[in-house]
Image (tube, grey):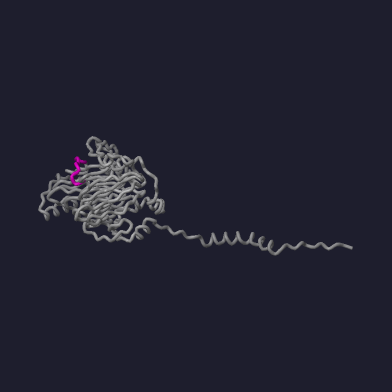
Amino acid sequence: MGHTCRKKRLPTSVKFIGLLAVVLPLAVSSKAHDTPKTLKTESFYENWIQSEGIPIYRGFHIDDVRTLQLKPWKRLGASGAYLVLDGMEGTDDAFLLEIAPNKKTLPERHLFEEVVYVVSGTGRMALWKEGRPKQFKDFQKGSLLSPPLNSWHEFYSVGNEPVRLFSVTSAPAVLDLFHNEDFVFNNNFEFTDRYNAEKSFFDTWEWFHYEGLEGVDPHDLQAVYTNFVPDVRKFELKLFPRGKDNSYGFLQMDDNVVAPHVAQWEVGVYSKAHRHGPGSVIIIIDGKGYSLVWTGSTHYSKGKPFKKVDWHEGSVFVPPLWWFHQHFNTNNGPSRYLAIGWVGRKWGINGLGTHTHQKPVTSLDEGGNQINYENEDPVIRTMYEEELKKAGVQIRMPAIVYQK
């Protein structure tokens, strides 16, 4: 008798797993192909400053930081506001901090650099390392300070008037890079190469030759390595080839990449137009005048767009990335600004445009970033003469033979 061959039945669970092995890859492949996952790109820094609960002022410029309205800032125990202006391009920022009379800020440390200009009032900065005594430095209106990277610090108001501070920081770049608030503000790493509780920390004042500018003799530059300037409005400057009677001084503080420089124009003169990378924050610390800012052409009147920014003490603006800008003094005395940005004398970040400062006074036709007087838009001189006439100031500019 013949035998009938029976097929062995597989358990239901095995059949199901086998089916998944065939169907699931098809389903996943189909889903991945037909409906790709959408990744939303966000700025950690932007979300963070909005959570701080203080005003955020945006736009092209601020007319006067001395009178700008502030609100209570819980994190620092004072009042404050952020300034996020167009020309910062998401690389750096600025903020105002006001401390009530005889009060102090809450202590903090952070992994971004900060340069502080004292807008008004008298006070004191405390600086210390974990487990070490505090060091103190008194300041006044016009002082310039820079809490070293990730060092504990706090600010005091001394006297009957509030203290108002203007700070420029690298916070946007750092917070967007790490996108972790705890890492940036609660990191116990100590940068002993920048600050090691030296007793002489605030007394450093060393002249150095800044050799990063092409076409300028390093011996002709005013360059100082320091961690404190008592009054930057009185900081000594030297003539600089940015235009007639234009003087400059360069500062390196705390080995920062974010560094200040100071410029001054004498009566009846203006600077040559130039351009550079983003984030050079300008605050007017003395005098009055205006700046022309434009892009799209070497001639201001052909620029698309172009702007005229009127300024006085307390005004702040930031020339956008690669836009030409030119500064004009209409005061009956010298006018001076403080600029803070990505132009460290010792360290730089080429990706943020610091390489554009290597040829700031070399003309465009020689591969640089400056427009000489004879190549500028003739309307510029006419406009300046009209502005000086209204101000009752005599022009002192040299005659120009314009190049066609």
Q: Residue at x 35, y 50 (%)?
A: 110
Front position in the image: 384 or 221 = 221
Q: 382 left or right of 186?
A: left
Is residue 154 or residue 62 the one in the foreground? 154
Q: Which residues are magenta?
A: 232-240
Q: Position of residue 196 (x, y in %)?
A: 33, 41
Tell me where residue 363 sits by quadrant: top left
- Res. 348 in view: yes
Q: Position of residue 160 (x, y in %)?
A: 19, 55
Give the number of marks. Answer: 0
Residue in front for this viewpoint, 377 or 269: 269
Looking at this rendering, what residue extends furthest in the bottom direction? Answer: 12
Q: Is residue 37 left or right of residue 98?
A: right
Q: Is residue 365 visible?
A: no
- Tell me the quadrant of the picture where the N terminus can be found: bottom right
- Residue 164 to residue 239: above or below: below
Residue 368 rendering spot, x and y as whole percentages: 28, 43
In percent of width and height, residue 176 lies at 39, 53
Quarter of the view holding residue 104: bottom left
Magenta-colored stretch includes residue 369 = no
